[in-house]
Image (cartoon, helix red, strand yellow):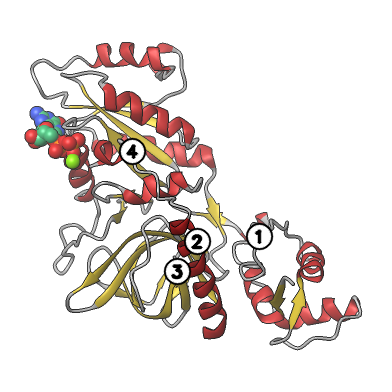
Amino acid sequence: PETITVQELANRMAARQGEVIKSLMKMGVMATVTQSIDADTAQLIVEEFGHRVRRVSESDVEIGIQGVEDIEDDMTSRPPVVTIMGHVDHGKTSLLDALRTTDIAAGEAGGITQHIGAYQVKLASGAKITFIDTPGHEAFTAMRARGASVTDVVVLVVAADDGVMPQTAEAIKHAKAANAPIIVAINKIDKPGANADRVRQELLSYELVVESMGGDVQDVEVSALKRTNLDKLEEAILLQAEILDLKANPERAAEGAVIEGRLDRGRGPVSTVLVQKGTLRKGDIVVAGAEWGRVRALVDDRNRQVSDAPPSMPVEILGIAGVPEAGSSFVVVENENRAREISEFRQRKIKEHAAAGKTAARGTLDQMLA
Ligand code: GDP
Ligand code: MG
């Protein structure tokens, strides 16, 4: 039967354990924090606390995990998560590199950047933007294959001297399938053969109508090389984020996505995750993909140890026993038994999948994002 402990339930709702116990008593259920209650009772409690219940799992093990949706009152705005897509050689990597240096801490001593698959820039205004920066962007591909998504906004890079090319069209298709709004970055406007109007014209055939042509798609002419209009591109991203009204509850136990996992020679298994809900803290017990462990250290994209990671922050986790699959989800749980249980369940699922001959879909998206 599907069960969840009172503790875990309270944790998931960011509610006081005492309040949950009180509500249970009102329903005639006597339970201590460590006792389990069945899913139907849990659902009543969850609804009583004003949340909606989304039962996602066909398994008893994962009930409660990713099952509780936040109520509006607990939500505060969070930075947008951006993926840059486009045809090969149109300047994705150059643009990511250029945007990275717009971080106000970029020039600071000790602010040595490291590549962790995603980074966050803090602008002079205080606003933050998270960029997914994974070579091959396995995470995006894998998550799309799972029907999940880490990306709020897609920046579509189109070289102004080359125009819309096959992988540009592919990128548009993927962004639309993922329901992610597109901002067009018309790149290489410094080049002699640049023709931004032609790019805008060509995009019409893909139902991307920029604002100057009466549509609602933002476009910005940039040069990654000369660092032209990077601020305008960032403004466009922040405007889009505002329209999307991106929010998360920072008070609950963390959940999110694994961007990259790798075995580091000195540090052992390292997972880069993107926190999507809640706040991840040092000492938390985490299940990531089919692996689990206690968070020994959190390291940000400037190689600094941090004590916690709020929504939309990419961070490296040290302390997970193995290397989780890119694109899988991570979740903080109440204790090691629970972590072991979920991890074993997921290991079993992976084996079943492998036995069924299913592998994660990998398409041309990998090339397009490299
Ligand atoms: P990617 O394949 O989309 O990641 O493209 P890259 O970032 O590797 O860029 C491909 C080539 O275009 C490189 O030689 C870059 O130096 C060049 N490039 C990128 N952005 C610009 C730009 O704004 N202006 C000019 N002139 N060249 C650029
Ligand atoms: Mg590249």
Q: Amino acid at mark 2?
A: Glu
| Residue carrying label 4 | 363
Q: Earlier in the sequence, mark 3 or mark 1?
A: 1
- Residue 174 x, y percent position in the rendering: 41, 33
Spatial distance from mark 3 to mark 1, Cα to Cα?
17 Å
Q: Earlier in the sequence, mark 2 or mark 4?
A: 2
Label 2 crowd bin: few (<14), some (14–19), many (20+), radius 10 Å: few
Between circles 3 and 2, the one closer to the viewer is: 2
**Does mark 3's beta carbon lie closer than 8 Å to ligand 2?**
no
Label 4 crowd bin: few (<14), some (14–19), many (20+), radius 10 Å: few
Between circles 1 and 2, the one closer to the viewer is: 2
Ligand 1 - quadrant of the structure image: top left
Q: Which mark is residue 91?
A: none
| Residue carrying label 2 | 352
Q: Earlier in the sequence, mark 4 or mark 3?
A: 3
* Residue 211 occupies quadrant: top left
Q: Amino acid at mark 1?
A: Glu
Q: Residue at x 75, y 88 (%)?
A: 32
